[in-house]
Image (spheres, helix red, strand yellow):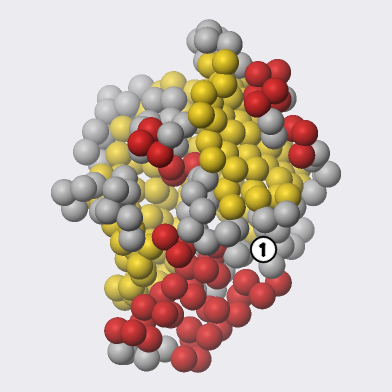
């Protein structure tokens, strides 16, 4: 999440140097995804997160969490602690993402009933996060170098002219066979992403429902993940957002997970 002023440069290179050849297109698509990955972000953020699960009949189950994120020397750290309802209160999740290309995220979950922190293995990262339509992997910050990227064309989403970029994982053991992202040409923000299962069937769609400008930052404040195969949805909405308040590294430890925020 470290602010990178050069983040917009790769997209400008795309506008000036686009060529129809596949090799150039592949390089350009990667440049766009790197620009999104490096989009200016605050050094730290705290917020209240409302995660609402919506079943096929429209029944809603809201859950409230406290979330904090911060960057420390090339490592982006995130901790999420459930506050309600009572059956999940005290459950916490922590993710460390690395700027180093090719290095996977480290993830942990704390379950109050077990009174211990459990490390999430690579095999478990494709599982559902607390019954939601987000997997543990979805909650990390995937480095663009893990995928091969191709521009499929252009489209308009929420009034934004977007590039459509297909990303295929280089690791055959990945949870998805491919994703397709709609990236705003003006704001370098992803407004939609389709996820395809191992059989290349559409599994779920992530939509950005709301953004908010806070100081010099463009923040995504509301999203929805729709599992089209199960007809189930998960909405995430951030409120009470605070930026660059100086969150300490000590707040991203296994001890902090068990203690709560």
Q: Residue at x 73, y 50 (%)?
A: 72
Q: Secondary structure at mark 1?
A: loop
Nearer to the camera, 258 or 158:
258
Task: State whether residue 122 is above or below residue 114.
Answer: below
**Residue assigned mark 1:** 40
Q: Residue at x 79, y 49 (%)?
A: 244
Position of residue 97 measured from the top left corner of the image (x, y, whole percent):
57, 48
Q: Quadrant of the N terminus?
A: bottom right
Nearer to the camera, 153 or 58:
153
Left or right of 81 in this view: 256: right
| Displayed quadrant of residue 127 | top left
| Displayed quadrant of residue 108 | top right
Task: State whether residue 95 is above or below residue 181.
Answer: above
Can residue 201 be seen in the rendering of this structure? Answer: no
Q: Residue at x 26, y 34 (%)?
A: 231
Q: Quadrant of the C terminus?
A: top right
Nearer to the camera, 91 or 206:
91
């Amino acid at each position: 999440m470290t602010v990178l002023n050069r983040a917009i440069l790769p997209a400008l290179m795309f506008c000036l140097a686009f060529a129809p050849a596949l090799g150039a297109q592949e390089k350009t698509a990667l440049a766009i995804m790197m620009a999104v990955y490096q989009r200016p972000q605050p050094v730290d953020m705290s917020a209240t997160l409302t995660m609402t699960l919506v079943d096929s009949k429209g029944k809603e189950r809201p859950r409230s969490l406290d979330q904090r994120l911060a960057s420390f020397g090339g490592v982006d750290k995130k901790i999420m602690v459930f506050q309600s309802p009572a059956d999940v209160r005290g459950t916490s999740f922590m993710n460390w993402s690395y700027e180093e290309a090719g290095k996977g995220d480290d993830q942990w979950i704390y379950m109050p009933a077990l009174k211990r922190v459990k490390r999430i293995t690579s095999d478990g990262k494709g599982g559902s996060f607390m019954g939601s339509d987000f997997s543990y992997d979805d909650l990390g910050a995937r480095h663009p170098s893990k995928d091969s990227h191709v521009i499929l064309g252009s489209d308009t989403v929420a009034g934004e002219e977007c590039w459509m970029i297909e990303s295929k994982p280089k690791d055959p053991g990945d949870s998805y066979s491919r994703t397709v992202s709609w990236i705003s040409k003006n704001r370098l923000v992803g407004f939609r992403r389709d996820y395809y299962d191992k059989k290349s069937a559409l599994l779920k769609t992530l939509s950005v429902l709301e953004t908010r400008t806070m100081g010099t930052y463009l923040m995504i404040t509301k999203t929805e993940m729709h599992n089209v195969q199960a007809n189930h949805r998960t909405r995430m909405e951030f409120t009470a957002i605070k930026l660059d308040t100086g969150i300490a590294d000590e707040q991203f430890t296994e001890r902090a997970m068990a203690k709560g925020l």
